[in-house]
Image (tube, coloured by chain):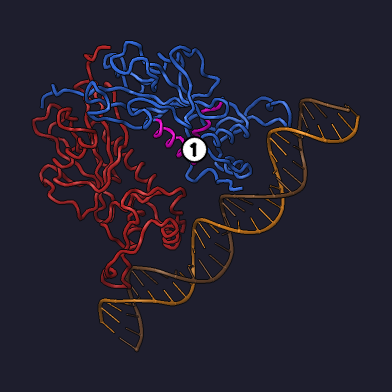
Chain colours: A blue, B red, C brown, D orange
Amino acid sequence: MSEDFPKPIVTVDVVVLTLKDGVLQLLLAQRAKDAAIAPGVWTLPGGFVHVDGDDSLEDTVRRVFRTKTGGEVAYMEQLCTFGNARRDPRGWSLSVAYLALLPEHKVTGLDEQRTRWATVRPCPDLPFDHRAIVAQALARVRGKAAYSSLPAFLLPDTFTLPQLMAVYEAVLDQQLDQSTFRRKVAEQGMIVKARGAHLHTGAGRPAALYKLSRPALQDFGRVLLGTRDA
Amino acid sequence: MSEDFPKPIVTVDVVVLTLKDGVLQLLLAQRAKDAAIAPGVWTLPGGFVHVDGDDSLEDTVRRVFRTKTGGEVAYMEQLCTFGNARRDPRGWSLSVAYLALLPEHKVTGLDEQRTRWATVRPCPDLPFDHRAIVAQALARVRGKAAYSSLPAFLLPDTFTLPQLMAVYEAVLDQQLDQSTFRRKVAEQGMIVKARGAHLHTGAGRPAALYKLSRPALQDFGRVLLGTRDA
DNA sequence: TTATTTAATTGCAAATAGCAAATATTTGCT
DNA sequence: AGCAAATATTTGCTATTTGCAATTAAATAA
């Protein structure tokens, strides 16, 4: 079997989400003015796999992210792969899409000229199949929010229960019931009290500080939260 | 930006599952005796993306599947993509893994010499990262079984409720409670009565025939089935 | 006819979820 | 200091859902 088959173009695209002003936002990057296609257009941050430099796809993602933002993500997972003959005018192209989460306070050193944040609901117009990728990312995040600790990766290492509930609500795009939320979060052993004082936010009783009981994603068998009808 | 980057090798690998003898089984294909690497070894069916012939990744999967088995799958979804510099001695390689389901009675025209079925629990030894791919496939199938109609794609178009419950049990590797199962399946409107006589299996009351209420995968918000402890 | 086998339904106790109200602990105002 | 307002946290109750076992239904086999 010959190894001289013509090969597809291989890239990664990253859906970077953060919580800004209480809503989910999406990182966009502006393509180079002299790019072969879509010059100057705002798209998902992405780039070619460098066979000679990147050890793995995750390496490519980290390099792309570092190049655009100078930082590291808090959480990353693979989303899906789009590959066909039509998505890129340069020829058969394949893109592996990743989802990355990042708490807002860790966003530093953004190149203000070449990157910007956009809301995900509604999602801005994006070229190629990037809207479909964002839709996949939202579906994934929403799905996992129902039975895992995923939304917590949009918060600082320590956080309060009202903050935690607010991220879940932002991600699920749905009101939750507080007493049920607390009950279930406690049942699952998702969080533990953090050392340090309670958080004074201004008025009202200060909230206790918590942190994740495990640093990695926790999957719970059952649905974490019920809806609130009223 | 030059398009003359060296590019990774791009392949697809397919985890084809069916229900044989009441348990989940996995299709293996034997590599060519004169293959550059791992000649004659049993692996997941797979192959290169043909830039000149395949319109999309799904096309590649269908072609690979047709080549090995002569048939079509009942259900197919993308699993995940493995890509790094180490998984293939020929160089940086990327494989998009797919999951495919097929009811046993639709398995026809297998090349007996070059393909065979193997149980998934335990999973046979497989080269490359194929065991990891199978593990992903099992996790996916099991996860989706809890809240979708996915296991039904391992059955004929019409089936009985005891048959349906048996596939769910085989996929989940867990006993279910029949009254809860029936209640929830009915609640979700997953199935409707099929035309035709009841199914006589020999002894006992004959079971009514049903079919999926929709031909595509149905996702339910809630967990479809509780465990049975006793 | 009657025992046996498998399918399908029913009834009920225990667990869980959703809702509303009460209680706790702070800040800001007078 | 004392009280209102704001936010956090807990508690109690009802309705729903779940898990389990028992019952009923419809066939075959002897």
Q: Amino acid at mark 1?
A: Ala
Task: Say whether residue A80 is magenta.
Answer: no
Residue B51 higher or lower than C6, as above or below: above
Task: Say whether residue A147 is magenta.
Answer: yes
Residue A11 location (% of width, % of height): 30, 22
Measuring 19% from the left and 22% from the top, which residue is drawn there? B90
| In this rendering, position of residue B92 left or right of residue B212 | left
Q: Chain of mark 1?
A: A
Residue B145 higher or lower than B199, as above or below: above
Q: Is residue A124 visible?
A: yes
| In this rendering, position of residue A24 left or right of residue A2 | right
Describe the element under mark 1 as helix, strand or loop: helix
Residue A48 higher or lower than A161, as above or below: above
Residue A226 location (% of width, % of height): 55, 46
On the image, which quarter does residue B169 sit in?
bottom left
Measuring 38% from the left and 26% from the top, which residue is drawn there? A126
Measuring 30% from the left and 46% from the top, which residue is drawn there? B121
Total of numbered circles in the picture?
1
Residue D23 higher or lower than A128, as above or below: below
* Residue range corresponding to the magenta coloring: A134-155
Nearest to the observer: residue C21 or residue B108 = C21
- Dominant secondary structure (helix, strand or loop) of the stretch shown in magenta: helix
Residue A178 location (% of width, % of height): 63, 41
Q: Which residue is mark 1?
A: A145
| In this rendering, position of residue B174 left or right of residue B104 | right
On the image, which quarter does residue D5 sit in?
top right
Residue A202 location (% of width, % of height): 72, 26
Q: Within 10 angstroms of label 1, few (less than 14), some, or many (20 or more) residues? A: many
Image quadrant in which the N terminus of chain B is located: top left
